[in-house]
Amino acid sequence: MTSGRPVTTALGIAILAMLAVTVLLPAQQRDPVTARASAATSTLTSLDYIEIQQLVRKSAWALDSGDNYGYAYADLFTPDGTFAGTNQGEGRTIQGRDQLATLARGGARGHTVQSHLTMNHVVKASADGATGRAYVVVVDVGVVGKPNRVNHGGYYDDEYQKTLQGWRFKRRTYYESKVDIWPESSPRPVK
Amino acid sequence: MRNAFATAVLSVLLVWFSGTSAQQPSPTPVLTALDYLEIEQLVYRYGYALDTGADNGFAYADLYADDATFTGTNQGPSGRTYQGRERLAALARGGKRGPNFMSHWVTNVVIEPAPGGAIGKTYVGIFDIGNGGNGAKSRVDHGGLYNDVYVKTPKGWRFKSRSFFESTSGAPVQPPPAMLTPPRALAANPAQSPNPESRTPNPGSLTAQDYIEIQQLVARYPYALDQNPDEGQSYANLFTTDAVFRQPRTEGRQNLAKMASGAPHGAKYARHFLANHVIEATADGAIGKQYLVAVDIGESGQPSSIFLGGHYEDVYAKTAEGWRFKTRTFIASVTGAEVK
């Protein structure tokens, strides 16, 4: 070991540099922006966000087109997935592939029907997948002999689950838009 | 041994130096796919926070950075600016609100990196839906454009400033006759219209960055058409040099620029609202489709109306300039019966 001194020096520099790094790295990890992003999206990657966005957009296409006898819509749900329309009478929950397909077969359907416009789609990671909300406005456009108009609208409250086929709706609930006052007792936080 | 130690020192120092340089804020940051998505989420949360007035309006105020401002350029002759958490919260407490009220529909979100963070612009359609549940007809109330500056704070992306501009049309132009006759008969053979659902899916060949860039391409389309600041140049540049637009069939950037300039436009004009943009990878690029609702926002107190609805079917190509439209086909909505 003729080079004991340089090795010691090298070792010393390395240790100092490592110390610098150990001080620096936690500083970067402490960066709340990075920390927050990784905590909130620990299970959602960019592609997860994008695929969930695509799922919600596809549901509008599938519903309006009634593609594949409504099964294009049904197949966006998990096998036990549900749709609930809280505006339908007392509120109606639809479950099962055939029942969901039937829903997407009713009314005016086809590739030139553009009725459900979804926007403002927010997505959050949850313990077993993701949850989200999207505004939906239902318009009557291109209806022969009728002026174009806004029919109704509201929002979807969704639960998404990642399956072998990709992200699917586990639960979707539609709420009609309405002007209201907040219940004094139960302020509802916004997702 | 000595070499090994020297290498260790060098590599450790390299890490240290790269760490130091990452600490310094770069003037114009590079936005990752996740940054785009998080800014988009901020823009979408805005609607809920404002329409519901949740948490006494503070859900809305907390979407802004500490010193941030909202400016309603339509409020009074010279506009009005709100600054500070209390003032912004008060803004979200006024007017029509409720846990289920949905009014601000935001779309066409264009985001760009900028010194200190990012800037963006969006369309907003302000709807009146379920007004008191008294059977009042749902309608488009008004709408326009937001111009935004975003900043990444310890809590995530926030608005540094947001300004609303009411949609105003520009000087009248005479649209080409073909643009006034959008309705087209139902396709006799549905197989003729490209339907992404029916193609063999080819997932995984588009990265998150590709999706974002294609979404940004489509989001830029309405601005180039409705605002058209440069005689159709920015519109034409969204297409490949050999692109085809239908209808009317238009080929080449020069013709596309000419066609765009024949459409109504103005510096603050918002008319083409896009939604439900789906994208799918193909062997040589990507295809996609999205809904269009063209809204004539009422000016000077006039009521708004929906000019037409329909959808675009697109083929995208990745060029040296980025993703571009290779073909874009507009198909107007036609339905025989009223949609329930």
Image: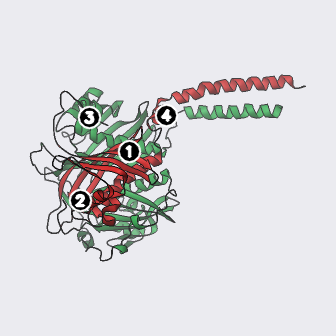
Chain colours: A red, B green
Seen from the viewer's position, the closer of residues A141 and B10 is A141
Q: What residue sits right under mark 1 in the picture?
A: B40
Name the N-terminal-most of marks 2 and 1.
1
Cα–Cα span, label 4 and label 1: 17 Å
Q: Is residue A161 visible?
A: yes
Determine whether, in the image, residue B299 is placed left or right of residue B2: left
Cα–Cα span, label 3 and label 4: 31 Å
Amino acid type, label 2: Ala
Q: Is residue A61 visible?
A: no
Percent position of residue A160, x then y: 38, 46
- Residue at (42, 37) in percent of width and height: A127
- Mark 3 in CB contact with mark 2 (< 8 angstroms): no
Q: Chain of mark 1?
A: B
Q: Chain of mark 3?
A: B
Secondary structure, mark 3, is strand
- Where is B9 relative to B330, above or below? above
Q: Residues within 10 Å of mark 3 (few under 14, many from 20)?
A: some
Q: What residue sits right under mark 3 in the picture?
A: B81
Q: Chain of mark 2?
A: B
Amino acid type, label 1: Glu
Q: What residue sits right under mark 4 in the picture?
A: A34
Q: What residue sits right under mark 2 in the picture?
A: B171
Quarter of the image where the C terminus of chain B is located: bottom left
